[in-house]
Amino acid sequence: MSLISQNIVSRDRVKIRKEVMDVPSFLEADLVMSTKKRKKDKERQVGMEEEREMKELENVLFGSLYSPVEFGKEDDEKVRDETGNDSALFFVDRTANNELSAYDEDADLSDGSGHDEYTKQKKAVWVDGEEKQTNINIAKVNKLRKLRKEEDETLISGSEYVSRLRAQHVKLNPGTEWACLDSRGQSNCFDDDGSSDEGDGVVVAHGYEDVEAVDDILRTNEDLVLKSSSKLLPGMLEFSRLVDANSEEPSNGPINSVHFHRNAQLLLTAGLDRRLRFFQIDGKRNTKIQSIFLEDCPVRKASFLPDGSQVIIAGRRKFFYSFDLVKAKVDKIGPLVGREEKSFESFEISPDSSTIAFVGNEGYILLVSSKTKELIGTVKMNGTARSLAFTNDGQQLLSSGGDGQVYHWDMRTRTCIHKAVDEGCINSSALCASPNGTMFAAGSDSGIVNIYNRDEFLGGKRKPIKTIENLTTKVDFMNFNNDAQILAICSTMKKNTMKLIHMASFTVFSNWPPPNRTLHYPRCLDFSPSGGFMAVGNAAGKVLLYKLHHYHHG
């Protein structure tokens, strides 16, 4: 057999091969068609899912537009089984039907004519009609069980469900009445059940009656609450240390006097270096304005007249000085006619600036006119006179001294109207009257400070309302602040012996004096007229300046 004959394929074999070659073409067509069909089915399914999601989103945003939303379609037996054992979670909400509703169907749930009028005035802009057809199972969902009014209640309508939700929200978040548009026509915009509020201890504030006054407040940027008129709290005193008042020119000797002018911007300092200095107090630079040198008088005390026109300067001399602020003139007064006093270092000025009272010899108190600088009268104590204090109206003068008694003098008749022993006092060393005229404080050599009610003391009550025992050495100086909420007491014999008393509670401020800063030997103190600044002069020649944060203005 030839080579060609060996390679010839028979017809049967060629036919079979052809049939075999033709079979995959039919299978491939069926495969393509099935793939396209599955793809179309998948696209249709995706489209249906997207359409269903869109409907659900529209239902959430705009209400039940396509199908009512129902909670808990399980059979009633299952619901009963679940709700039968939930007594521990059940409570009756008595206020759910008395809250604000924006729907006409819920108007019958409110009580009171005022609430009915408000409901009629405030109508819903749009109401979903399908809410009536919607049924919600509030017994199925745990967080909705609080909306039930009865224990066996399960299904409620959609509008009732919305009303109870709104009522629950108003109960948990009571509305602010100042946000009401018409505060005159209604007493409470979000009127809850009064009995429920009383039972829960909630007090609902009444609306503002004067809307124009409220509008006037909101039109300004001024402080609505002045701190100076509020009550100072005991315990801790809020203060900060500022630049020393005399930082531009410290004194070369101890500071014996610091005093604020009535405008609260001018402070005078004086001491044994025989210089009188004036500083403009701002808490930052405290610029020095003027300095006056008195060659023959180491200053023991210097003080402004209450009207701010003059400064009285005195020391251990037979004379004293008067400095006129308007004319910038210094006058030397004394010795006084008929008197032999060798020192005028202790004095007080009446609040009306008419009289200057000096401590004299042998219990005498010298009364000098602030205008003429002449002696106009004297009064005499049984013992030696050591300290003086005028009342707030200037009609009476208080004095104390070596006999341990406190005298009350009538300045019009210049007679003693009352005297009584200061309890526990042998030698009185300091005296101070409150600016409001209700109290006065008396200090002694033993460091005891007695605080009295002045009317009760004049009425015969000898017992002090409070005894302060925080000092152990002689009380040299005491001073009330402008609103009599703080009393400062100090002794010059020991370092840091200065205490600030909270007068409402009669307790000492625990953070004064500052633990990390030394006051050295304090010798004098003064508060600014509005109470914002406190200046402390010490034996080192410095005037420490503090800002009291409770008082807004300096």
Image (spheres, rainbow, N blue to C red):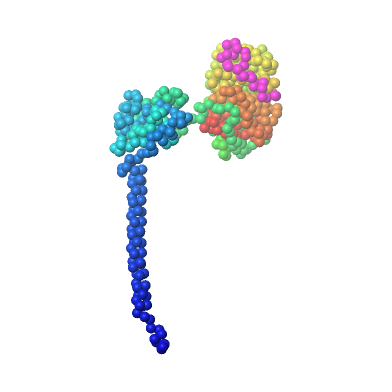
Name the residue located 53 percent from the left edge and 26 percent from the top edge. 231
* Residue 230 percent coordinates (x, y): 51, 27
Pick out the residue farthest to the front. Answer: 1
Name the residue located 40 percent from the left edge and 84 percent from the top edge. 7
Give the total number of marks visible in the rendering. 0
Q: Which of 141 and 391 is in front in this view?
A: 141
Q: Which of 18 and 343 is in front in this view?
A: 18
Q: Which quadrant is home to the N terminus?
A: bottom left
Name the residue located 37 percent from the left edge and 72 percent from the top edge. 20
Residue 2: image quadrant is: bottom left
* Residue 525 percent coordinates (x, y): 62, 29
Residue 237: image quadrant is: top right
Q: For this view, does 519 lie left or right of residue 280?
A: right
Residue 499: image quadrant is: top right
Is residue 99 visible to us here? yes
Q: Magenta segment: does it hold 253?
A: no
* Residue 500 percent coordinates (x, y): 61, 27
Name the residue located 36 percent from the left edge and 80 percent from the top edge. 10
- Please tell me whether residue 428 is drawn above or below residue 238 in the rendered image: above
Q: Which of 24 and 522 is in front in this view?
A: 24
Q: For this view, does 273 lie left or right of residue 143?
A: right
Q: Magenta segment: does it hold 454?
A: yes
* Residue 264 percent coordinates (x, y): 54, 31
Is residue 320 visible to us here? no
Q: Give the range drawn in magenta.
A: 448-473
